[in-house]
Image (spheres, rainbow, N blue to C red):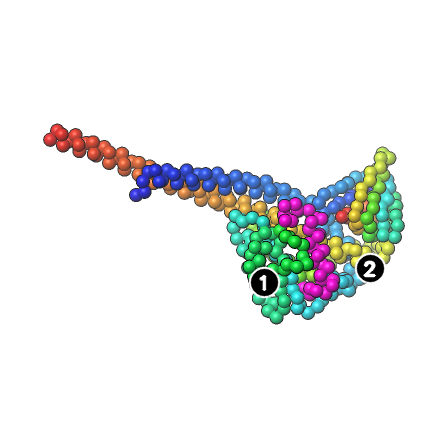
Amino acid sequence: MANLKEIRSRIVSVNSTKQITSAMKMVSAAKLHRAQSAITRMRPYAEKMQEILRNLSDSLDVSENVYGVQREAERVLIIAINSNRGLCGAFNNNVNRKVRELIDRHKGAKVKVLGVGKKAYDTFKKTDELAGAGYPELPYEIFNDLNFENASEIAESVMDKFAEKRLDKVYLVYNSFKNAAVQHTTVENFLPVEPPKSDEENGDNSGQTEFIFEPNKEEIVEALVPKTLKIQFYKALLDSNAAEHGARMTSMHQATDNATELVKELNLVYNKARQASITNEILEIVSGAEALNG
Amino acid sequence: MRVEIITPDESLFKGEAKSVSMPGIDGSLGILDNHAPLITALKAGDVHVRTGSGEEKTFTLKGGTAEVLHNRLLILAE
C-alpha cells in the first residue's frame, strides 16, 4: 500500500485539478451564453435574407450568377472550422475526420484545406493539403474577435477565388450547435451556390405579392448572393463557436465529476492506510508492554 | 409604418417612423407610409429615419438590402 504522504499529495493535486476544471466549466458556460445570443441576434437577418432571395429566385435562375456556376470539381477547397483551444472532447477530431473523408472522396481532384481555428491549422499544417498562399494569413485569429466584418474577409477571399475559376467547389465542415451537450458535425456545400429551396408555405404567401424591384431583379440578386454567402459563412462560425463552448462545458463537467470520484476513492485509501498504521502502532506498543511484563 | 434596421451582429433600430430616406443604388430613395411592396439594393451611405415625434435618427451603412411589405420596412444592413 502506498504510504500516507504519497496519497495525501495526490489528493491535493487532484483537488486543485478539480478546481481548474470546474472554473473552466463556469467560463465556458458564460461564453456559451454569449455565443448563443450572437446566434439568436443574427438568425432573423439570415432568415429574412433567404426569404428575399426566395422571392427573387421564383423567376430568376441563381445558377447564372458567378457564384452559382457548376463546374467539374477539379480544385476543391474544404473550409474546416475548429476551435482555437483544446480540452473540448472530440470536438475538433470529429470535424477533421469528416474532412479526411471528403479528401478521400475527391481522389482525382486537387484538394486543399483552409483551417479556420488554430487546431485545424495545426492538424493540416503537417500535411501538404493546407491552403497557404492567397488566403488570409493565420485565419485562426478570427475567434479572438468574432464579428461579421472579420468573417466576411475570409469568405470574400474564398469567393474571389471561385469567381476567378481557381476553385471549383468549396465545402464547409463545422460543428453545428444543437444544445449545450450535443453538436452535429455538418458538411455544407458553400460554393457553387444552390438555389434556395422554395418552401411550400412561404412560397404561397410571397407569390401573391407583386414587388417593385429597384433598380432591377438582376442587380439585386447580384448584390444579394455574395451577402448570403457571407452570412452562411458567418453563421457557420457562430454555430461552431457556440458548439465549442458547449462541448468544453460538457467535457469539463465530466472532468470535474471524475475528479470528485477520484478524490473520494483516494480519501478511502488514505483513511484505510491511516487506520492500518495506527493499528500497527498500537500493536507494537502492546506487544512491547507485553514483553516487559512477561 | 414600422421600421427595423438590423445587421448580422445587432439590431440598430426598431420602431415607428413617418419617413425614411436611404441610399439606393441609383440614387436616394424616400419611403413614406403605405409604400407599395419593394425590394431594393442599397449602397454605402446614410439612412435617415424620421420618427413620429419629428426626431431624426441617422445610421451609416456600408450597403445592404431593403424590403417594404405590409407597411413594414426592413433594412438588412451591413
Residue B8, position as x, y percentages in the image: 72, 47
Residue positioned 82% across, 38% down in the render: B57
Task: Give the mark nearest the N terminus, 1 or 2.
Answer: 1
Q: Nearer the viewer, residue A262 or A122?
A: A122
Q: Which mark is residue A42?
A: none
- Residue range (magenta): A141-169
Question: Where's the N terminus of chain A, which quadrant?
Answer: top left
Q: Is residue A31 left or right of residue B8?
A: left
Q: Nearer the viewer, residue A156 or A178?
A: A156
- The amino acid type found where label 2 is placed reads Glu
Q: Is residue A41 visible?
A: yes
Q: Is residue A44 visible?
A: no
Return the residue at label 2: A218
Work out whether A243 lies above or below A57.
above
Quick one: SS at disc 1? loop
Residue A178, position as x, y percentages in the image: 60, 50
Residue positioned 65% across, 49% down in the render: A142
Return the residue at label 1: A128
- Examine the structure image and report whether residue A163 is included in the region drawn in magenta: yes
Question: Where's the C terminus of chain A, which quadrant?
Answer: top left
- Examine the structure image and report whether residue A16 is included in the region drawn in magenta: no
Work out whether disc 1 and disc 2 sit on a shared chain: yes
- The amino acid type found where label 1 is placed reads Asp
Residue positioned 47% across, 42% down in the render: A256
Q: Is residue B9 left or right of residue A261?
A: right
Q: Nearer the viewer, residue A22 or A112?
A: A112
Q: Nearer the viewer, residue A283 or A142?
A: A142
Query: Mark 1 or mark 2: which is in front?
Result: 1
